[in-house]
């Protein structure tokens, strides 16, 4: 299979910058960390201690959960490019940074690729190309990162995976249909739900595990996919309010 080296168009990159918190280049914030460095023993805890205040907590497990929510945008950017633009990013933890930014008193980082290497889909066998991207993104990046953060911060891998997958669902159910990019979205999403559990380092594929039917929640007056796990958001705000999808908030 011949690989096709490409690049994002200006419009494509601009969309990801504005909606996926993507940054490309070497400019960084004062407090930036390379993803690869977080895989070292003890590094995740040290990093969590530097961002806890911005997340409104003094607990590493809470900070770890909220960090993985923010890092859900990395999957959004990579899968958005694949399904909307038919292009994949080269995934290398050594080339990806978390740049700290505070917005209205809340820590909302940006995901920076020092160099954005892009590969276009081949003329034939898009299935194999997509499978390689899933493997690279999830088994190659998220698995070791989630394993390290879960171990260092003593938080459930299930919670961290669900935090990521909720953003993936948002991409395929809301963003792609909204902008009219649906040619490959349906088959790509189905392929993700059917991907081997080994791609995620889990006994079951978390993309499929957390993809439950939406139910009508009276309190929210809306159809909601209720979370399986709690993300600890209520511990990171003074009012103690919960997410709209919280299993305790959405009793039916």
Image (cartoon, rainbow, N blue to C red):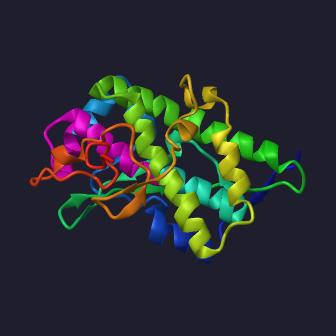
Q: Is residue 107 above or below residue 143?
A: below
Q: In the rendering, at what x and y percent does residue 26 appear?
A: 45, 58
- Left of 164 or right of it: where is 3? right
Magenta segment includes 70? yes
Residue 197 image point, x, y percent: 61, 28
Q: Nearer the viewer, residue 242 or 238?
A: 242
Per the rendered image, the range of residues in magenta is 49-73
Q: Does residue 69 appear in the picture of this structure?
A: yes
Image quarter (top left, top right, bottom left or bottom right) of the N terminus: top right
Q: Position of residue 148 (x, y in %)?
A: 39, 27
What residue is shown at x 42% (from left), y 48% (from top)? 71
Residue 34 figure quarter: top left
For the residue pair 232 and 250, the one nearer the viewer reads as 250
Q: Residue at x 27, y 59 (%)?
A: 219
Q: Position of residue 10 (x, y in %)?
A: 61, 76
- The residue at 74%/65% (across/down) is 183
Pick whichever, 50 or 61, lies toward us: 61
Majority secondary structure of the magenta segment? helix
Residue 224 belongs to magenta span = no
Residue at the extreme bottom: 11
Q: Is residue 222 left or right of residue 10?
A: left
Residue occupying image coordinates x 67% and y 30%: 196
Is residue 176 rendered to the left or right of residue 241? right
Q: How many circles with numbers are drawn on the protein?
A: 0
């Amino acid at each position: 299979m011949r690989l096709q080296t490409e690049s994002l168009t200006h419009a494509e990159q601009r969309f990801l910058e504005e909606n996926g918190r993507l940054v490309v280049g070497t400019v960084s914030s004062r407090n930036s960390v390379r993803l690869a460095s977080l895989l070292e023993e003890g590094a995740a805890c040290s990093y969590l201690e530097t961002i806890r205040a911005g997340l409104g907590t003094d607990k590493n497990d809470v900070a770890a959960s909220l960090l993985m929510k923010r890092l859900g945008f990395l999957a959004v950017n990579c899968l958005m490019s694949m399904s909307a633009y038919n292009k994949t990013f080269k995934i290398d933890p050594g080339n990806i940074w978390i740049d700290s930014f505070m917005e209205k008193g809340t820590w909302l980082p940006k995901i920076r690729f020092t160099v954005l290497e892009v590969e276009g889909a081949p003329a034939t066998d898009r299935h194999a190309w997509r499978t390689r991207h899933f493997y690279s993104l999830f088994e190659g990046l998220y698995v070791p990162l989630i394993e390290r953060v879960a171990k260092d911060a003593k938080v459930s891998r299930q919670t961290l995976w669900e935090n990521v997958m909720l953003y993936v669902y948002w991409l395929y159910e809301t963003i792609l249909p909204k902008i009219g990019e649906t040619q490959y979205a349906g088959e790509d999403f189905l392929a993700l739900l059917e991907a081997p559990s080994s791609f995620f380092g889990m006994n079951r594929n978390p993309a499929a595990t957390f993809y439950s039917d939406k139910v009508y929640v009276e309190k929210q007056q809306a159809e909601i996919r209720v979370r399986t796990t709690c993300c600890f958001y209520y511990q990171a705000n003074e009012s103690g309010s919960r997410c709209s999808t919280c299993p305790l908030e959405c009793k039916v």
